[in-house]
Image (tube, grey):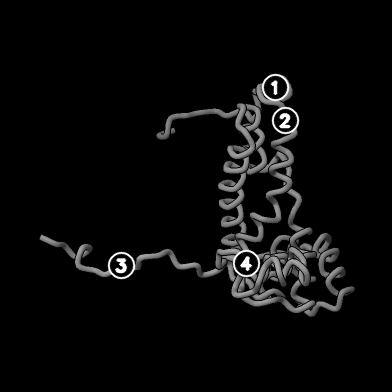
Amino acid sequence: MKGPVEDLSWDKKLKARITTPGAHPRIHGYDVRGDLMKNIDLPALILLTLTGELPTKEQKTAFEKTMIFIAPISVNEAPVHASVLAGLCGSDSTGRAGVAAITLAQQARCITREHEATDLQENTGETTLLLNELTKHKVQFPQEFRTLPPIQAAIAVLNHCCGLNTEQIEQVFLMARMPCALAEAAAVKPGDFREYPIELPGFEYTDGDK
């Protein structure tokens, strides 16, 4: 006897919604090797892939500058720390990359959710560096962005100037920070725990009832 699943008709092939494979692969219909490679750069390609549209000059500039602005991430943050530990434990490049990707994705989600929920306070120091750079390149943005803390300002720029939604911004954070995470993890020698502060951080475990 057939059930509800067996009674349905199913597609016979996977659908290529973004990248069309073949001798001349395409992204959103654009010939990658015969056209895009000759005429656009990597930031524009990333925006095209995420949004389905080629960016304007201002969108590309805002995206590129903001990616650089949010790229730094050090070993004192969980994604890099976890990747370094994977390297110390002998993971190869694929293992380190997997750890970095998962933890960076989780961090990006926390950052964007915090941006949505937090009553933000003024913090203009590093924010001014980003927004002055955008102004120099004639990128338009609301002046109230200058009152936002640095990461929240970066998120606002990605949303307002580049047209990215929350999920896409999470992906941008992952891509922007992945190089630092991978490079830091690759810089450690497997098994070299003498270089790692093995007793840090110190945790105190207590009963849940206390």
- The reply to whether dot 3 and dot 1 touch (C-beta < 8 Å) is no
Callout 4: few (<14), some (14-19), or many (20+) C-alpha neighbours within 10 Å? few
* Alpha carbon separation for disc pair 4 and 1: 46 Å
Q: Residue at left 56%, top 47%?
A: 102
* Alpha carbon separation for disc pair 2 and 4: 40 Å
Residue 136 drawn above or below residue 69 = below
Residue 117 drawn above or below residue 203 = below
Where is mark 4, residue-wise?
24
Quarter of the figure with the C terminus: top left
Residue in front for this viewpoint, 172 or 116: 172
Which of marks 1 and 4 precedes in the sequence?
4
Where is mark 3, residue-wise?
10
Which of marks 4 and 2 precedes in the sequence?
4
The spot of residue 66 in percent (x, y) is 76, 64
Residue 39 drawn above or below residue 42 = below
Callout 2: few (<14), some (14-19), or many (20+) C-alpha neighbours within 10 Å? many
Dot 4 lies on which element?
loop
Q: Amino acid at mark 4?
A: His
For residue 114, what is the image quadrant?
bottom right
Quarter of the figure with the N terminus: bottom left
Where is mark 1, residue-wise?
192
Which of marks 3 and 2 precedes in the sequence?
3
Circle on res. 188: 2
Please identify, in this view, whether the residue under mark 3 or under mark 1 is nearer the observer.
3
Please identify, in this view, whether the residue under mark 3 or under mark 4 is nearer the observer.
4
Please identify, in this view, whether the residue under mark 2 or under mark 3 is nearer the observer.
3
* Alpha carbon separation for disc pair 2 and 1: 7 Å
Q: Amino acid at mark 2?
A: Val
Q: Residue at left 59%, top 48%?
A: 101
Q: Residue at left 73%, top 46%?
A: 180
